[in-house]
Image (cartoon, rainbow, N blue to C red):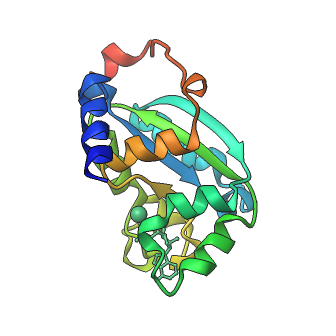
């Protein structure tokens, strides 16, 4: 286990996934897809100035979700969470930019929409903690783990964002 984390740490720093190249994993959950919120949510990250590196619509398998939410396996809501996440397709994305992990979490709001300020995604688009429309990695390390879990190498696009000099 320790070896796994040490190797992830060294990968983060060797791969240059820091500074403006920092990446995070964002998933638009099945309720938001059903409620036609995909465009509005993607637009918030675009408008902020972050760079889209990967995007796909996926029906997540049980195995993938068990691994993704492994830390929560002993929570009373775990079974319901897996069921919710399997109830329809998810829009899986990777976004890149300066401090993107922390900033994206701020853009999402709190886990419970009732505690999320207006102006955040959960504050504006949902009311129930069990239907909170979006996932975002909570640290650079979990972002790295989640990106490897949800995407294959070739699915991440390397491209020049023309607006970068106007953002940085
Ligand atoms: P996060 O998504 O803000 O990081 P976590 O604590 O990692 O929050 O929980 C993962 C997901 O589990 C939440 O986004 C939410 O969908 C679900 N969840 C968390 N707490 C509860 C709860 O008390 N009841 C039902 N679902 C919950
Ligand atoms: Mg979490």
Query: In front: 14, or 20?
Result: 14
Q: Quadrant of residue 4?
A: top left
Q: Residue furthest bottom?
A: 76
Q: Position of residue 36 (x, y in %)?
A: 72, 55
Q: Position of residue 85 (x, y in %)?
A: 65, 65
Query: In front: 2, or 151?
Result: 2
- Is residue 40 depicted above or below 120 in this figure? above
> At x 33% / y 18%, what residue is drawn?
166
Q: Position of residue 2 (x, y in %)?
A: 25, 51
> At x 66% / y 71%, what residue is drawn?
84
Asked if residue 134 can be seen in this view, the reply is no
Q: Quadrant of residue 82?
A: bottom right
- Is residue 139 depicted above or below 23 in this figure? below
Q: Quadrant of residue 105?
A: bottom left
Asked if residue 129 can be seen in this view, the reply is yes
> At x 45% / y 12%, what residue is drawn?
160
Q: Which quarter of the rendering shows the C terminus?
A: top left
Q: Position of residue 132 (x, y in %)?
A: 54, 69
The image shows a total of numbered marks equal to 0
Q: Is residue 2 left or right of residue 50?
A: left
């Amino acid at each position: 286990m320790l070896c796994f984390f040490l190797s992830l740490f060294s990968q983060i720093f060797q791969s240059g996934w820091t500074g403006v190249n920092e990446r995070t994993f964002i998933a638009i959950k099945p309720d938001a897809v059903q409620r036609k919120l995909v465009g509005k949510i993607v637009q918030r990250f675009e408008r902020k100035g972050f760079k889209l590196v990967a995007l796909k619509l996926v029906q997540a398998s049980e195995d993938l979700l068990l691994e993704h939410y492994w830390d929560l396996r002993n929570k009373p809501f775990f079974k319901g969470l897996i069921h919710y996440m399997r109830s329809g397709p998810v829009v899986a994305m990777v976004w890149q930019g300066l401090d993107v992990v922390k900033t994206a979490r701020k853009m999402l709001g709190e886990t419970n929409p009732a505690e999320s300020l207006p102006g955040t995604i959960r504050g504006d688009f949902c009311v129930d903690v069990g239907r909170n429309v979006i996932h975002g990695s909570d640290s650079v390390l979990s972002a790295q783990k989640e990106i490897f879990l949800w995407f294959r190498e070739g699915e991440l696009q390397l491209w020049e964002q023309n607006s970068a000099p106007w953002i940085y």
